Amino acid sequence: IEQYGEEIHYADRYHDDDHEYRHVMLPKPMRKFLPEKPYLMTPREWRSLGIRQSIGWHHYHIHKPEPHVFLFCRERDYQTKYPN
């Protein structure tokens, strides 16, 4: 998994009035590390795949045609509202 770390693509963030969103695309060869039946992963699980993001992001949706694309969301202005 570590060998693919630099190939993980983090799309630009976008938002609505309440939430911030981001898509993270794993390289297609990493599909072999994904569960056979996709499910919403915990931060510990998606971080174990090499995905690196700040605290507050939640895996909120599965794009069935492309299981290597992870869809994340978090409360808008999360880092301002909940500083470390």
Image (cartoon, helix red, strand yellow):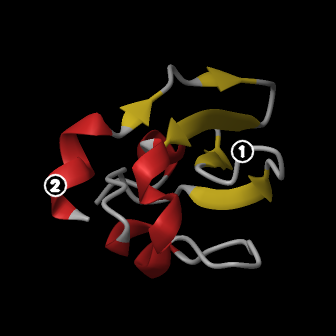
Name the image quarter holding residue 40. bottom right
Image check: 25 left or right of 44? right
Residue at position x 59%, y 50% in the image: 68
Residue 64 seen in the current view: yes
Does residue 79 appear left or right of residue 71 in this picture?
A: left
Mark 1: secondary structure? loop
Query: 38 or 12, which is in the foreground?
Result: 38
Mark 2 is on which residue type?
Gln
Tag 1: amino acid: Glu
For the C terminus, the quadrant is bottom left
Q: Can I make out residue 77 in this image? A: no
Residue 15 image point, x, y percent: 70, 24
Mark number, residue 27: none
Tell me the residue at 47%/78% (across/down).
45
Foreground of the two, 43 or 18: 43
CB atoms at circles 1 and 2 under 8 Å apart? no
Image location (x, y in percent) of residue 39: 75, 75
Q: Measure the C-alpha gap from mark 1 to mark 2.
A: 21 Å
Q: Which quadrant of the figure contains the N terminus?
A: bottom left
| Place of residue 48 in the rendered image (x, y in percent of width and height, measured from the top left) | 34, 74
Q: Give left or right: position of 63 versus 12.
A: right
Q: Residues within 10 Å of mark 2 (few under 14, many from 20)?
A: few
Residue 76 lies, with reference to residue 58, above or below; the image says above
Sort mark 1 into few (<14), some (14-19) or many (20+) by Cα contacts within 10 Å.
few
Disc 2 is placed on an element classified as: helix
Q: Quadrant of residue 6?
A: top left
Look at mark 2 in the image and give the residue it sits on: 3
| Residue sitting at x 54%, y 55% | 57
Which residue was labeled with disc 1? 66
Query: x and y percent of residue 66 in the render?
Result: 72, 45
